[in-house]
Image (spheres, helix red, strand yellow):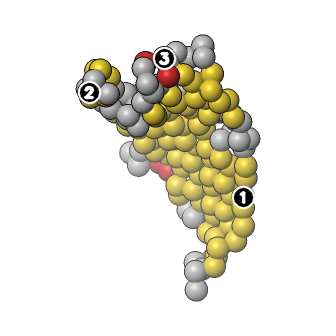
Amino acid sequence: MSFLPGFLSGFGIFANYTHTWSDATLQGREGFLPGQAGDVANFSLYYDKSGFSARVSAMYSGEYIAEIGKNEDWDIWIGDHWQIDFSAAYNVLPWMQVYFNAVNLINAPKYEYYGVSTRPKLNEYYGWWIKGGIKITR
């Protein structure tokens, strides 16, 4: 948004959304293409100016079938998933950058289920993590 005045001209937005339709014949029955989420979206608000950059990003992936079972009740599905990340960096010198990254800030779980979402197979929480440091590019 470089058209904005002064400090505000460093802000920007990234956004995308994809909806996929798929049909597949799976062991003699109609179904969805395995591994393909019907809905996927990403959104980022960022700031980049005067050697400083920061970004907060949100990612969404809709549920999808991961494995085909002997019938629909035994199909393994991966539940929908949200994730929010943050990153920032500052160029201290032309050859030195200080950076910070934080991933999975909302501690979104990985949820797998058999056939319908009320029959859980797996519910894992990976937690959030951070890393930071100095990059030297000389």
The residue labelled by disc 3 is 73
Q: Which one is nearer the viewer's eye here, 95 or 132?
A: 132
The residue labelled by disc 1 is 131
Work out whether residue 40 can be spotted.
no
Of the residues tagged 1 and 3, which is closer to the observer?
A: 3
Q: Earlier in the sequence, mark 2 or mark 1?
A: 2
* Quarter of the rendering occupied by the N terminus: top left
Q: Residue at x 50, y 28 (%)?
A: 76
Q: Residue at x 46, y 44 (%)?
A: 12
The residue labelled by disc 2 is 25
Identify the element where label 3 is drawn: helix
Amino acid on which disc 1 is placed: Lys
Q: Is residue 42 left or right of residue 137?
A: left
Q: Residue 48, percent across and down?
A: 52, 55
Q: Quadrant of residue 114?
A: top right
Q: CA distance from mark 1 to mark 3?
A: 41 Å
